Each structure stands twice: as structure tokens, then as C-alpha cells.
Amino acid sequence: MTRRLRLAVLSLSGLLAAVPAMAEQQKFKLINKSGYTLVRFYATPSNTDDWGRDIFGDATLASGYSSYVTVPGNSSQCVYDFKMIFSDDDVVVDTINLCQTATYTIN
């Protein structure tokens, strides 16, 4: 095997070994400092049009509290859209790179 071909095979095997590590669930700390209770929370990869299900289900997140959130599914996506619905019916949509942060604060 030529040196160039060996390097190509090694590079390809390194890429394939990294794929399972990248396709993990996204987990982050959500901090609510909004002054209102967060009653519904949606997170979806930015390249998706469907919000999916409310991650909180029957739970809520009162202002002044925090919770760890795991985004459903296994995705290699880093950029997510968040849709947050509060107790006063206010709706806030934001985009976040979950590969660059482990905490998201609602102000």
C-alpha cells in the first residue's frame, strides 16, 4: 500500500470513529430569570421545521430556578431553535449553538 493510500485510509477510519461520538443527545442547563414561569419548552435542530413535542410535558420551570434539559433524539446538530411559552402566554423563539455552551439563561 502506498503511503498516500495508507494516510487516506487512516483519515477515513478516524472520521468514522468520530461519528458515534458526535451523534449524542444534547444536554444543557436551562436557567429561568424571566420573571415568569416557563410552561412549555421546545428545542429542534435549526434545519428542521417541526417543533416536535413539548420537552417539559407536565412540568414547568418557575422564575429563579434552573433545570438540566436533554434534547430528545440523537443528532449531530449543534445549532438549535428554542421555543419557550410562559405563564403570561408570551412566546419567545431563540437560536443557540449547544456545542459551544452548556448553559442557557432566559432573562
Image (cartoon, rainbow, N blue to C red):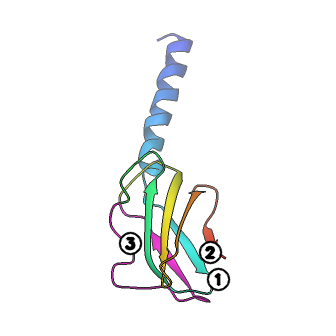
- In terms of sequence position, does the residue under pointer 3 or pointer 2 come before the other? 3
Q: Which residue is mark 2?
A: 106
Label 1: how many residues lie within 10 Å, few (<14), some (14-19) or many (20+)?
some
Above/below status of 19 relative to 65: above
Residue, x 50% and y 57% (percent of image)? 81
Rendering quarter of residue 106:
bottom right
Residue found farthest to the front: 89
* Magenta residues, start to end: 52-72
Residue at the spot 50% in from the left edge and 84% down from the top edge? 88
Q: Which amino acid is tagged 2?
A: Ile
Q: Amino acid at mark 1?
A: Lys
Residue type at mark 3 is: Ile
Write down the residue under mark 3: 55
Give the tally of numbered discs: 3
Whole-percent x and y of residue 65?
Answer: 58, 88
State the SS at label 3: loop
- Residue at (51, 55) in percent of width and height: 80
Toward the viewer: 85 or 33? 85
Instruction: Compare marks 1 and 2 and give the one earlier in the sequence.
Output: 1
| Label 3, label 2: how far apart the Cα atoms are | 16 Å
Query: What separation in Å lies between label 1 and label 3 (alpha carbons)?
Result: 19 Å
Tell me which residue sits at (51%, 10%) in the image.
Answer: 2
Residue behind mark 1: 33
Whether residue 97 is visible here, answered yes or no, is: no
Residue 73, percent across and down?
A: 35, 58
> In the rendering, at what x and y percent does residue 61 appear?
49, 85
Separation (CA) of disc 1 from disc 2 = 5 Å
State the image quarter where residue 58 is shown: bottom left
Q: Residues within 10 Å of mark 2 (few under 14, many from 20)?
A: some
Q: Tell me which secondary structure the magenta stretch mostly adopts.
A: loop
Of callouts 1 and 3, which one flags the residue occurring earlier in the amino acid sequence?
1
